[in-house]
Image: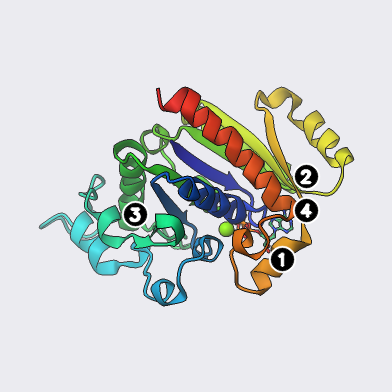
Amino acid sequence: MKIAVSGKGGVGKTLIAGTLARLFASDKYNVLAIDNDSAMNLSYTLGIDPEVKKNIIPISEMKELVKERTEVKGGGPGIYNINPRVADIPDKYKVSGPDGLELLVLGGIEEPATGCLCPENALIRTLLHNLFVKRDEVIIVDFEAGLEHLGRGTAKGIDVMLVITEPSQKSLDLSKKIIELSKKLGIINIYLVANKIIDESQLEIIDGRIDEWDVPLYHSVPYDTEIGKADLNGEPPLEYNPESAALKSIKTLYGKLKKLKEEVFDL
Ligand SMILES: Nc1ncnc2c1ncn2[C@@H]1O[C@H](COP(=O)(O)OP(=O)(O)OP(=O)(O)O)[C@@H](O)[C@H]1O
Ligand SMILES: [Mg+2]
C-alpha cells in the first residue's frame, strides 16, 4: 500500500506519517518512509539514530547525482533528461531505523524566484513514480506543503491520500485545493484527517465545510500537549508517551488503514 500524507504547513503531516510508518513496521510490515520535505523532520518522528541522521543528504541536494542522471550528453543548457534512471537510488541511499523500517530522504524542491530547478524536479518526480509503482513495501510519503510537483504519472500509484487539516479556515482552504488536485491526478481514495482537535464543535464546523467536497472526514486526532513535550525532548512521540491521547488516536487510524490494506490492496 502506498500512502501519501499532505496538508498545509504545520498541521501534523510529519507526526502522522512518521507514527504510521512506525506502527506498520512494528507489525512486521516492510516499510519505506519517504521524506519529501525540505525541513527533513521525519527522521525525528521515526527515531532514526542521530549518528545515521547526521550523514543523510537529501537526494535533491546531491548535485553530482542529479547531474549524472539528468545530463544529456552534448545537450547544452536547459536540456536535460526528464525520465532519468532511478531504480537503484532507493536501495542505495535509504537508511535503517527502529523495527526494521527504512527511510529515504528525497528532500523538498524549493523553486527559486528566478526559475525552476528542473533537473532536480525531474529526478524527484521520476523517483516518486518509481517508489509508487515499482516497490512492494508499505510506502508512506511525508509530502511538502504543496503538491505542485506531482504529475498524473507520479500520482497514479498512490493508493491513499491522507489530507491532514487543522481546525482553521486557512488549513481547510488548502485542504480543498489539495483534494481537488488529487482528484484531477486520478487518486481514488482521498481521506481528510482532522488534527489538533480540542472539542466536538470544531468537528461539526469541519463537517459542515466538507459537505460538498465528496471526501469523508476519515479520522480526527485530538490536540495533545504530550506531542510538544516529545518534540522538545527530541524523542519520537510513539516512544515518549505511546498512551497519550493523540498517539492512541493515531493507532486507531493505523487500524483503519491496516484493515483497508488487508481487505482491498492485498487482494
Ligand atoms: N495532535 C497534536 N497535538 C499537539 N501538537 C501537535 C499535534 N500534532 C502536531 N503537533 C505539533 O504541531 C507542530 C507541527 O507538527 P508536524 O511537524 O507534524 O506538522 P507538519 O505538517 O509536518 O509541518 P511542516 O509543514 O512544517 O512540515 C509540531 O510542533 C507538533 O509537535
Ligand atoms: Mg513536516
Contact? badges 3 and 1 (CB < 8 Å): no
Label 4 CB-ligand 1 distance < 8 A? yes
Disc 4 element: loop
Q: Amino acid at mark 3?
A: Cys
Residue in front for this viewpoint, 84 or 88: 88
Q: Earlier in the sequence, mark 4 or mark 3?
A: 3
Residue 258 as seen in the image, left or right of residue 151: right
- Report which residue position mark 4 lands on: 223
**Which mark is in front, 3 or 1?**
1
Label 3 CB-ligand 1 distance < 8 A? no
Q: CA distance from mark 2 to mark 1?
A: 23 Å
Work out whether 56 lies above or below 149: below
Q: Amino acid at mark 1?
A: Gly
- Report which residue position mark 3 lands on: 118
Tell me if mark 4 has few (under 14), some (14-19) or many (20+) residues whose alpha carbon lies within 10 angstroms of its own.
some
Ligand number 1: quarter of image: bottom right
Q: Residue furthest left?
A: 74
Q: Residue at x 85, y 34 (%)?
A: 204
Q: Earlier in the sequence, mark 2 or mark 4?
A: 2
Q: CA distance from mark 4 to mark 3?
A: 39 Å
Please provide percent x and percent y for residue 247.
67, 52
Work out whether 154 lies above or below 216: below
Residue in front for this viewpoint, 111 or 107: 107
